[in-house]
Image: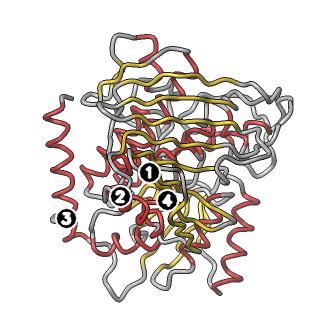
Amino acid sequence: MNRRHFVKSAIAGTLIGKSVIAQTSAASANEKVNVAFIGIRGRGKNLIGSFAALPDVNIAYLCDVDQKVLESGGADIEKKTGKKPQLAGDLRRVLDDKSVDAVVIATPDHWHAPATILACDAGKDVYVEKPASHNLKEGRLMVDAARRNKRVVQHGTQSRSRPSTQRAVEYVKSGKIGKVYMAKAWDVQLRDDIGHKEDSSVPQGVDYETWTGPALMLPFNENRFHYNWHWHWNYGTGDMGNDGVHQLDIARWALGVDHPTEVSGMGRKLFFQDDQQTPDTMNISLNFKDKVIQWEMRIWNPYMLEGVDNGVAIYGSDGMVHIGRWKGKSGFKVFDGKGEQVLFDDANEGDYHARNFIDCVRSRKSPNAEIEIGHISTVYAHLGNIVARTGRKIKFDGETESILSDPDTSRLLTREYRQHWATPKGVRT
């Protein structure tokens, strides 16, 4: 797909989202939006709390492949709301129900794209957690699915709806720190050593076949299951894809950039001697025409950088802005050209992202973290991981979303899929 076609497609999708979609709103102003949750452990459980707090949301379904998690979640919702949602182990049952207006997807990474595409094709609006996709190719397929079905799809980068981060980006773009040339995003939080575990039998009540989905089938292992799947390439994207997409998204938002032209650096395991496959240490440079984003990751640190474990610094010719969380409060600090702090905007804020999504389900307007925004931010993580896995510098063509002159490295823009009912159409199997 060439640049002209790409731009026309994007513009057409935006116009459709503001006109034709407006005629197909799922819920009227006086009705509650029926929402189903696919993947309800960990981040999914947190999202249930955020959406349940909204007065115009009805939790219609919980869907999970772990029966114990599913039953516990259903009982918890019934206790809090007085109404037990329907429970399903197969997302196709949820998608077949025409009363469901929207789905919230908080599965492992390898299910984000398949579930989103199926949901869009079923006429559902979607809130999908970060990273948008498991690989770059299927991320673009998610955007295509949203466009052809005229669906509202929100990516789970909550900072796009956080007032303090919006103020920080506005401050950067106001010119008050001069001309901006560079941003640094970092993740220096302390993660766990997961040790070593042997393959074992599948726990009772777990549908491991469905959990694996279109990924390659591997023997069950506790260190590749609940949460620890993040650190294995078959299912996850490491911490650059997990937490890093948040900071990378803020950095590119503040700099006003899209696809990088070149990505280089390193990523490897230096500290953990365990079953994790993904790096615990990374230093990646993403180069643009006249700007640079630097990504730094050390997930074995008991300390922080600039007072925050996950943060962003925006560097201008006359000052800099730091964005992060200090003592549990999201906010930003401004420093002048001498490095002196001149402003500290610390806000104690809630989750505005769920509210924005539901408002857009009703209005049919584009959400704050529309899927193409999330896809491009996730591309940064995918390219950084490819550099880490291959040790090669990447020259990237944003018009076609392809790596130039390196067929071997280009293979990592997609993945090997097994034949499965959820395998996205248009990918190489």
| N-terminal-most mark, 4 or 1 | 1
Q: Report, in whole angstroms, how far the alpha carbon at label 3 lies from the one at label 4.
A: 36 Å
Name the amino acid type tagged 2: Lys
Mark 2, secondary structure of its residue:
loop
User: Circle 2 is placed at which residue position?
Assistant: 176
Residue 96 seen: no
Marks 1 and 4: in contact by CB < 8 Å? yes
Mark 4, secondary structure of its residue:
strand
Q: Report, in whole angstroms, how far the alpha carbon at label 4 lies from the one at label 2.
A: 10 Å
Front label number (3 vs 1): 1
Name the amino acid type tagged 4: Val
**Quarter placement of the C terminus:** top left
Q: Residues within 10 Å of mark 1 (few under 14, many from 20)?
A: many
| N-terminal-most mark, 4 or 2 | 2
| Residue in the image at 32% along x and 85% along y | 29
| Residue 18, numbered circle | 3
Q: Residues within 10 Å of mark 3 (few under 14, many from 20)?
A: some
Q: Report, in whole angstroms, how far the alpha carbon at label 3 lies from the one at label 1.
A: 38 Å
Mark 3, secondary structure of its residue:
helix
| N-terminal-most mark, 3 or 1 | 3
Name the amino acid type tagged 3: Lys
Compared across the picture, whether 406 is left or right of 67 comes to: left
| Residue in the image at 21% along x and 70% along y | 22
Q: Quadrant of residue 286?
A: top left
User: Circle 4 is placed at which residue position?
Assistant: 334
Q: Report, in whole angstroms, how far the alpha carbon at label 4 lies from the one at label 1.
A: 7 Å
Front label number (3 vs 4): 4
User: Circle 1 is placed at which residue position?
Assistant: 319
